[in-house]
Image (tube, rainbow, N blue to C red):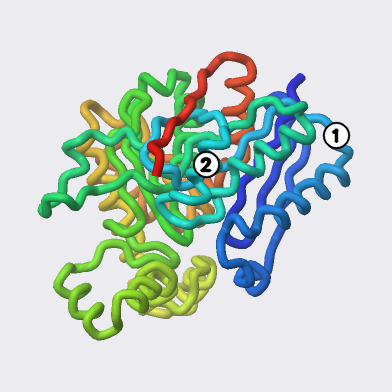
Amino acid sequence: MKNIIAVNPGATSTKIAFYQDDKLVWKEDILYESELLDKFDKVFDQFDMRLKDIEECLYKNDVNKIDVAVGRGGLIGPVKPGAILVTDELINHLQFNPVVEHPSNIGAKLAKSLMDKYGNGGPAYVYDPVTVDSMRDVSRITGIKGIERTSTGHHLNMRAVARKVAEDLGKPYKEINLVIAHLGGGSTASAHEKGEIVDFVSDDEIMFSAERSGGIPLKSIIKKIKEMGVDEFNYLARKKAGLQSLCQTTDLRVVEKRIKEGDKEATLAFDAMALGIAKTLAALATSINGPIDMVCITGGMAHSKALCEAVSKRISFIGPFKAYPGEFELEALALGGLRVANKKESYQVLKFPNK
């Protein structure tokens, strides 16, 4: 039996879970006030605090030995999907040369430190990082040479959902085609063809979400940037847009309550969001060669029955629909680590150019 720790550091929390083989034993969310985290200049400055809090959870739950530790993969840059061995070289890259400064970047160092102390220095891994990239070249091209579409988003959860779809259909993941949207504060979506994510929609493209603007007409963007400046516009588009801008809330439940009370503005915003999600899924379906076995939504917003119904009606011509509410990231980390430990899956060792 393998004792497995999965660690997912986020913007205001560190989520951890303890598995024995494929069975969840316990999980906890260590929450942080934004004011506390704002005191740290860099994400890696939070490392000691987050590690200490994780170790307190392990002590409280009588965990003193682990066989596998898997951390949330940060913004490494384009990598293949699956497990990546945590090395000092990887940690240094995430600390000093990440694509973007983000809490998930310390997931690798947290996992390695836990293995050093509780796992006799055994190997630690990250799994399906944010920057997994197997997009086809044709899907990257935009109308401006040198500006390409990227594959940055909720790979960990969407690949976990893809495996669940395969299990539900009774087929191997490498034999099915599906499109998936992860819906939350930011929303991304992916096209899976025979086990490969061949196209991807990032959170600044088609659909808006709870906080993000999604795609906006270019001429309007240029005008707004001239009025506000780059930094203020970026903050608006990534933190104060979407439902926050249209309905003054990021909580879809509040929007639905207002709809029941007859609020026409909330109704229009909800319908527009559902349409944007459906457009995104439909667009991705055109990147897949062959029929679509399943159209899925996941993430926090997938708990909304009304949103599921609204999206399902619009995409019924593409293929069958199913919602997988919530997120499965800790499970995906733990089970990925278990497959590697049991030699059912290999892992990558990344090398980085000297900078």
111 and 291: which one is in front? 111
Q: Quadrant of the C terminus?
A: top left
Q: Position of residue 146 (x, y in %)?
A: 16, 50
On screen, residue 332 versus residue 265, left or right, reads right
Q: Position of residue 353 (x, y in %)?
A: 38, 37
Q: Which mark is residue 73?
A: 2
Q: Residues within 10 Å of mark 1 (few under 14, many from 20)?
A: few
- Answer yes or no: is residue 238 visible: yes
Q: Position of residue 6 (x, y in %)?
A: 66, 38
Quadrant position of residue 78: top left
Residue at 63% from the left image edge and 32% from the top image edge: 334
Q: Position of residue 45 (x, y in %)?
A: 63, 59
Per the image, label 1 sits on a secondary structure element best described as loop
39 and 270: which one is in front? 39
270 and 42: which one is in front? 42
Residue at 63% from the left image edge and 19% from the top image edge: 341
Give above or below for 122 relative to 226. above
Q: Quadrant of the N terminus?
A: top right
Most distant residue in the bottom direction: 227
Residue at 45% from the left image edge and 24% from the top image edge: 169
Quadrant position of residue 232: bottom left
Per the image, label 2 sits on a secondary structure element best described as loop
Q: Which residue is mark 1?
A: 64
